[in-house]
Structure formats: C-alpha cells, structure tokens
Image (cartoon, rainbow, N blue to C red):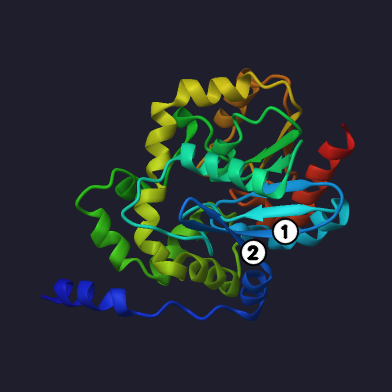
Amino acid sequence: MWAVLLLAAYPHIPPPQLSPDLQSWKSSGKFFTYKVLLISYQDSVGDSCGFTRFPTSSYDWYKIWEGLTLRFHRVIALDFLGVGFSDKPRPHHKSIFEQVSIVEALSRHLGLQNLRIKSHDYGDNCCSGNRSGQVCLSNGGIFPETHRPLLLQKLLKDGGVLSPILTQLMNFFVFSRGLTTVFGLYTWPSESELWDMWAGIRNNDGKLAIDGLLQYINQRKKFRKRWVGALASVTIPIHFIYGPLDPVNLYPEFLELYGKTLPWSTVSILNDHHISHYPQIEDAIGSLNAYMGFINSL
C-alpha cells in the first residue's frame, strides 16, 4: 500500500529551483533543433574553436569554463539528448550513434571544423570517429572489460521491470549517495553542487529518462570492436586526463589496457591520488593545466 502511494506521489514532487549560478548558465545557453528535438548548448563566439562534451550536463565544466574561454576564442558546450536542458523524450531509444549524429549536426549548424574536443565519461564514447583536430579524453569507460558501473546503473541499464519503479522513486538522497562514491574522499562536491547536478537531471523530468541513457553500457559492449577499433585507428593527437582513484575505471587496469590500445597517446595522471572520476570538478586547476599542457605541446 505504501509503495503504491509513493509511486503515485513521487511524479508530482516538483523539481528543485535552479540556483542563481545554474539559472545564469541556462539563460546564457542556446538551442538548436535536431529533427524535432531541442538540444541545449553554450557558445562563446570568437575566431578559433574549442569544443567540449559532457556527462551529467554541460555545467559539469563550470570550474574550468573561464580558463577555456581565455585560451580559446570559441568554446562550445553541449548537453546531450536526455541531459541537462536538452529535451528528454521518453520512451526513446537513445544510442551513442544518435548522440554522435547530434554532435555532427551541431557542428554543421555552427560551421565548425578541425575541432579540439575535450570530453569526459559518456562523451569519450562519442569521440572514436573524430578524424580532425585533437581529442582529450577523461575518465571514460572506453573498455567494457575495465568498466565497473555502479549498482543503480546495473539495475537500470537493462530496462527491466524495476527500471520504471526505480526511476520514479529516485530522489536527491539516493542520487547524492550514489554520486559521491565516484568522488575522492577529500574531494566530495558541496551540497550546493550536488543540488545543481540534481536540478539538471530533474529538468524536463530527466530522472525518468535515465534508464534510456544507460543503454550506452550495453551498446559499448556490443560494439566494442567497432568503437575501440575506430579510436585505435585515428592519427590525430590524443591525450587522456586520468583521476586514478576512479572506482568506475580502475587503476592500474584501465591505464594498462589504454596504453596497449593507444600506445601513441599521451596521458596525464593527476598527481593528487585523491582525485577520482570527476577531475574537472575535483581538481579543476590540475585538470585545466593538464589540458593546456597537451594543447601547448602540439
């Protein structure tokens, strides 16, 4: 009985209000239409181009945004379909192939060429086909054999009978308890940062679309040969910024396989071994310096 009442009540709990900083981020953003879907992005316009892609939402990069815009005259930050302030259709079969198509459509829409791509997590899987510019990856589960998804991700990724129940019952407490496990012990996000992340997820009823987004875990295993093979065959400069305490991409197993697969790629292991899955949030200065070191070496 209580379970029925909870399921009935939870969809009607309003999302949290956006903080002033997150509201400012949203207000400064733009939208373009992919087919019938609205995709949110940030665009600092100028003469040259930096391009960034994101996991939780584009706001994950706010700590290094100023540094990027000072170095590059143009920086574009994309919210993938189902993420942040982009549309979150359901039911909708989301795939990495579709997300790549959205990125390509945005690039054509803005007239972008020779992109410098800085990606993280989910975004790393969308970079394998890039053939121009430079790519900097960060703590993404590129290899299914070294990826360790969280318990909730395991439960949701197969879209079973529990998925709609779990997404309905998900709340800030469940979200924050799960997310902080992928941060270092001394680098946890503040409560206000967690609320900003949660507000981005709740926007457009996004928590109900999470199970669809997590299909990429199954897709990565199914298309492992194709995606990893594409990444291993690129000839453009590639760099990887790694937070070594990451429980999702275990050290040293991940780096050993990465080194065998892409022996020509350069790697920055952040010196503070308390840094985990979110280097750009946990060690913004170290992450930005590592990226600038890569760019300046070219």
- How far across and down, in percent of the image, does residue 21 sit? 66, 75
**Up-down relation of residue 26 to residue 70 (above or below):** below
Any part of residue 139 in sight: no
Q: Amino acid at mark 1?
A: Asp
Task: Residue at 69%, 70% (x, y): give it.
Answer: 28
Report the quarter where the C terminus lies: top right
Q: Name the one closer to the observer, 240 or 86.
A: 86
**Up-down relation of residue 288 to residue 171 (above or below):** above
Task: Residue at 47%, 60% (x, y): give it.
Answer: 87
**Up-down relation of residue 153 to residue 125 (above or below):** below
Classify residue 33 as left or right of residue 52: left
* Residue of label 1: 43
Q: Name the one closer to the observer, 287 or 113.
A: 113
Q: Which mark is residue 30?
A: 2
Alpha-carbon neighbours of circle 1 within 10 Å: few (<14), some, or many (≥20)? some
Q: Which mark is residue 213?
A: none
How many numbered callouts?
2
Report the quarter where the N terminus lies: bottom left
- How far across and down, in percent of the image, does residue 271 sit? 75, 44
- How far across and down, in percent of the image, does residue 200 sit? 52, 67
Q: Are marks 1 and 2 in contact (CB under 8 Å)?
A: yes
Task: Residue at 41%, 70% (x, y): give it.
Answer: 173
> How far apart in space, not on screen, are marks 1 and 2 (Cα)?
8 Å
- How far across and down, in percent of the image, does residue 26 sit? 62, 70
Q: Earlier in the sequence, mark 1 or mark 2?
A: 2
Any part of residue 58 in sight: yes
Q: Amino acid at mark 2?
A: Lys
Classify residue 80 as left or right of residue 134: left
